[in-house]
Image (spheres, rainbow, N blue to C red):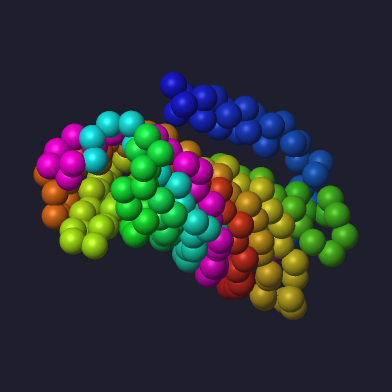
Amino acid sequence: MKFRRFLGLAVVLASLVGLAGPSLAQSEPRGVYATVYGQASWLGSTSFNEVGNAGFGSGLEASFNTGFGLGANIGFQFGNGWATELEWNYRSHPLDSLTKGGATLATDGDFASNILFINGLRRFVGLTRGWTPYLGLGVGWVQEIDLDLNTSSNQRAWSEQGKFGVQFIAGGEIPLGNAWRLVTDVRFLALGGIDMPAESGVTGRLSKPDYNPVSLQVGLKRLF
């Protein structure tokens, strides 16, 4: 149900971007660009069950500290306010605690992902002076997502791949000359609950921990 709501939000955002008429998009350079960036990433607490020999059982609650990420994209500006890009993103969220019924089971681990996105961006050229705001929508393919839960005696990992998600983008760019741009944006990634089979140090699976991080990223963009 949560993922369906995220898809509904995607449709609404796409509609709003599409309604932003051509009057807001003035002429801008047409061509290829590339961006590299770093990001801070926040992942909310999630409840899930463990089925297997780890001994954690059901009714688990995991919380995470502020994570980090990095990535790059290569894209094309069409010169009319629209752009499309292929993005690679890696991010990791360190485990704060894994609890069950008030008892702490683990404080070492992380929830990490490696994802490829195809993004569409609506750039509002000429709307503001000195910078260009933009909105975007992306579809991501999960190359791998894994959750590690470690104790003093055991290192356990569960992972999945091949899932799809949606990301929402809102940000802006500031020119640093003819070819370079400083870009910063907020991105919300919606993967929803994921069944994760055991990868190493354990058997069974994790039943649908949620993965819906929000990130703030800063990068450098180069026009070619």
Residue 157 left/right relative to 33: left
Residue drawn at (81%, 41%) of the image: 23
Looking at this view, name the residue that lies furthest to the top: 1
Can you see residue 150?
Answer: yes
Residue drawn at (21%, 54%) of the image: 156
Residue 180 is covered by the magenta coloring: no
**In the depicted view, which residue is nearer to us: 57 or 86?**
57
Q: How many marks?
A: 0
Q: Quadrant of residue 174?
A: bottom right
Q: Position of residue 147 (x, y in %)?
A: 31, 51
Secondary structure that dominates the magenta span = strand
Q: Position of residue 97 (x, y in %)?
A: 41, 51
Looking at this view, name the residue that lies furthest to the right: 129
Q: Quadrant of the C terminus?
A: bottom right
Can you see residue 75?
Answer: no
Task: Tell me if residue 21 comes above or below residue 92 in the rendering.
Answer: above
**In the depicted view, which residue is nearer to us: 13 or 77?**
13
Residue drawn at (17%, 45%) of the image: 54
Task: Specify the segment rendered in magenta.
Answer: 29-55
**In the depicted view, which residue is nearer to us: 31 or 93?**
93
Q: Quadrant of the N terminus?
A: top left
